[in-house]
Amino acid sequence: MTRKLAAGNWKMNGTREALDELQAMTSAHPEPRVDILICPPATLLLQAAALSADTPLWIGAQDCHSAASGAHTGDISAPMIADAGAHAVIVGHSERRQDHGETDEDVCAKASAAHAAGLVAIICLGETLAERDAGRTLDVIGAQLAGSTPDSADAANTVIAYEPVWAIGTGKVPDIAQISEVHDFMRENLTTRFGATAANIRLLYGGSVKPANAAEIFAVGNVDGALVGGASLSAADFSPIITALEAAG
Ligand code: PGA
């Protein structure tokens, strides 16, 4: 089985002084029993990757363009991210889908570009509150999973993050049965499409994961880690989440 993964998404937070938090995280977990990834803003990628080069901490980006290069002002490409020393890139975060109108097709193309550059693609999915209230959660997740995951996906190059839009940054978390239902559904879907490798594709839960609720979430079957926003910004908050994931076995 692939190791579990504690992933942090700093979003549009962090200037150079935030690199101290990375150092605090690596000192607190010199030999972690889980994989640890932090996705800082693009401005810090190069320095963050250099700082953590000889540590178990992996660095990732928060988005990439689907093209390798070209006239796309303001964008960064997957080969540039790999060149900066990063291991992974988040694609299809709901804030990208909402703020930038990214479709499943766009996300799929970005994930393909990540794979072509040798990066792990962390593909994000999640229903809105209106979709959940309408009883459409599994339909939405099924469509996003099918549409956003390229044929090149396997357990080594792809991580799926289930992040209910209404749980992100709100302090609201789905109940355990709701998380379990979606994660089991994603595993089944991936197995139907990809066969045996799907058993080892890591499925993260994301949305208001905190030190206080991490252990309960990590005890859910088919939850192989977390994608953490706010609580990944400081070592003081992220470290107990890493420890809870290690304890979940
Ligand atoms: P949050 O963000 O942990 O701050 O809710 C999660 C995410 O957007 O990945």
Image (tube, helix red, strand yellow):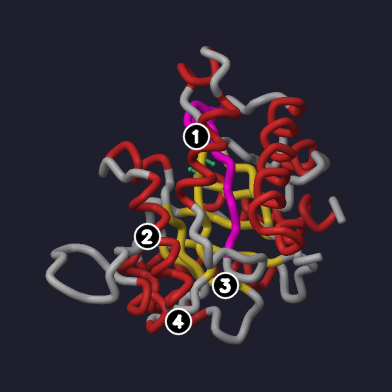
- The residue beneath circle 1 is 168
Q: In the rendered structure, does residue 200 fall within the stretch colored magenta?
A: no
Label 3 amino acid?
Trp
Where 181 sits versus 211, above or below?
above
Residue 236 makes an appearance in the image: yes
Specify start and end residues of the magenta stretch as a single range: 158-171
Quarter of the figure with the C terminus: bottom right
Q: Are marks 3 and 4 in contact (CB under 8 Å)?
A: no
Residue 133 image point, x, y percent: 53, 13
Q: Residues within 10 Å of mark 2 (few under 14, many from 20)?
A: many
* Residue drawn at (72%, 44%) of the image: 188
Q: Mark 2 to mark 1: distance in Å?
A: 24 Å
Q: In the rendered structure, does residue 164 fall within the stretch colored magenta?
A: yes
Q: Mark 2 to mark 3: distance in Å?
A: 23 Å
- The residue beneath circle 2 is 109
Q: Mark 4 to mark 2: distance in Å?
A: 22 Å
**Marked residue nearer the N-terminal end (2 or 3):** 3
Q: Nearer the viewer, residue 77 or 171?
A: 77
**Marked residue nearer the N-terminal end (1 or 3):** 3
- The residue beneath circle 4 is 85
Q: Secondary structure at mark 4?
A: loop
Whether residue 40 sits left or right of residue 161 in the image: it is: left
- The residue beneath circle 3 is 58
Q: Are marks 4 and 2 in contact (CB under 8 Å)?
A: no
* Residue drawn at (57%, 16%) of the image: 135
Residue 12 makes an appearance in the image: no
Cβ of mark 1 under 8 Å from ligand 1: the answer is yes
Q: Mark 3 to mark 4: distance in Å?
A: 9 Å
Label 1 amino acid?
Ile
